[in-house]
Image (cartoon, helix red, strand yellow):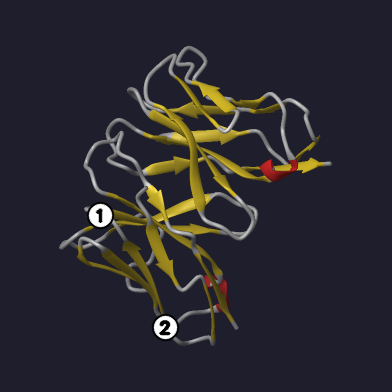
Amino acid sequence: GAVVSQHPSWVICKSGTSVKIECRSLDFQATTMFWYRQFPKQSLMLMATSNEGSKATYEQGVEKDKFLINHASLTLSTLTVTSAHPEDSSFYICSATGQSSYNSPLHFGNGTRLTVT
Amino acid sequence: GDSVTQMEGPVTLSEEAFLTINCTYTATGYPSLFWYVQYPGEGLQLLLKATKADDKGSNKGFEATYRKETTSFHLEKGSVQVSDSAVYFCALVGSSNTGKLIFGQGTTLQVKP
């Protein structure tokens, strides 16, 4: 079946540095990718929606200058956490879909656990 | 706006017990409904889905029926196993939001041998 690969699976970085997380669709063209954030013992919060070749649409309250999203190709989207701080420590998950229907299947990556020290 | 509400956990059951995790939703139109499962340290996996009223989604012994009259999509399994221990998320995609999932808060299930 369709697979979404997310890399890295975990990363530890120092406060003030930037971290890039990649999300790749391995066997389909992902026209739309979604980035979610999950706090411990809480649900997933949608951060932004990105369509290939256009700017990402951010949810209310998400800082677009802090969480840079690039979706330059139909198989790759990246999330860069800029000038990371300990409060950015979280589990980040991407999902991708290759269709534009509300009934389209979504495929999730395995997530990236970010720890900022 | 659209929202999903799940029963609070954790839910602790003995092996072979019957499981119900309640899920209700608020949405305009006719959303699609999903249950996702997250095993420890892993990403989300689609467990089952239903796209219209009275549809029943089923997979791995789990099932859920889309009830529009009660705006519910409760997850059930007749006999749980230790390997079912995970976090279960109810979610919807609204009819006007392409692929954008709205998640419930998640329910942790712990099955003891």
Disc 1 is attached to a residue of which chain? A
Residue B54 position, x and y percent, is 44, 14
Disc 1 target residue? A30
Q: Residue at x 53, y 86 (%)?
A: A15
Q: In the image, residue B53 lies at what x, y percent?
A: 41, 16
Density class for disc 1 (Cα within 10 Å; few <14, some 14-19, many ≥20) is many
> Residue A18: which disc?
2
Q: Is residue B41 above or below residue A102?
A: below
Please identify the quarter of the rendering in which residue B100 is found.
Answer: top left
At 56% from the left and 71% from the top, the residue drawn is A89
Q: Secondary structure at mark 2?
A: loop
Q: Position of residue B39 (x, y in %)?
A: 61, 51
- Circle 2: is it few (<14), some (14-19), or many (20+) Cα within 10 Å? some
A15 left or right of B21?
left
Dot label at residue A105 = none
- The amino acid on which the numbered mark 2 sits, given as a three-letter code, is Ser
